[in-house]
Image: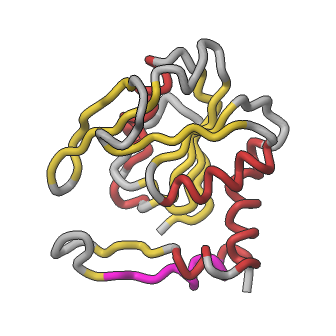
């Protein structure tokens, strides 16, 4: 079994979560297995190892887990992007559409400095709405987006189209 097959086989489908008709891709079986977790992180960081990156911008919540591990490997900082009202200092915010409503994400105004080279990290690329919105926050902060790294891409949702201006790396395509 290849590394990609090992990772794919560990993803658990959870039907009707968070809403009826949605099949949630649960990565917790990967996270709890030290070999699979290490493999996932290694695959996500691989194309960015030789690039100078100042910080990882990670999206709540599973992005924090992956982003922290990637930041450690790249020897850089990690910046959290959180849901509205969760960050304690002054923030920039962006509201965007979801399959089942809208959401607002925030980043501290001092989290990314002008000229910082940033890698955006999250567990899943679906429609591209969340990642595209976070790219706007990074750019508003003055950051330069080096790339976007995801563990999973739901290719049938065409999220890459919304993110066509950025280098995208996805470990698994489902």
- Image vertical order of residue 110 relative to residue 64, above or below: above
Q: Residue at x 73, y 31 (%)?
A: 53
Foreground: 97 or 6? 97
The part of the image, by quadrant, that contains residue 112 is top right
Q: Residue at x 30, y 75 (%)?
A: 23
Residue 94: x and y in percent read 30, 30
| Residue 61 inside the magenta-drawn segment | no
Residue 137: x and y in percent read 42, 26
Foreground: 113 or 85? 85
Q: Residue at x 57, y 37 (%)?
A: 79
Q: Quadrant of the N terminus?
A: bottom right
- Image vertical order of residue 99 relative to residue 21, above or below: above
Residue stretch in magenta? 5-14
| Residue 7 inside the magenta-drawn segment | yes
Residue 102 shown left or right of residue 25 in the figure? left
Q: What is the magenta segment's predominant secondary structure?
A: helix
């Amino acid at each position: 079994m290849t590394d990609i097959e090992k990772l794919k086989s560990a993803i658990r489908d959870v039907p009707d979560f968070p809403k009826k008709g949605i099949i949630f891709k649960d990565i917790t079986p990967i996270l709890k297995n030290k070999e699979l977790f290490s493999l996932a992180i290694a695959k996500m960081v691989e194309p960015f190892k030789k690039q100078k990156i100042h910080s990882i911008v990670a999206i709540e919540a599973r992005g924090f887990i992956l982003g922290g591990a990637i930041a450690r490997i790249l020897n850089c900082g990690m910046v959290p992007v959180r849901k509205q009202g969760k960050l304690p200092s002054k923030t920039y915010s962006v509201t965007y559409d979801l399959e089942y409503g809208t959401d607002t994400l925030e980043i501290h105004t001092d989290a990314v400095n002008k000229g910082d080279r940033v890698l955006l990290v999250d567990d899943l690329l679906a429609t591209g709405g969340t990642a595209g919105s976070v790219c706007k926050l990074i750019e508003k902060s003055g950051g330069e987006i080096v790339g976007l790294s995801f563990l999973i891409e739901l290719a049938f949702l065409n999220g890459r189209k919304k993110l066509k201006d950025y280098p995208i790396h996805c470990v698994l395509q489902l």
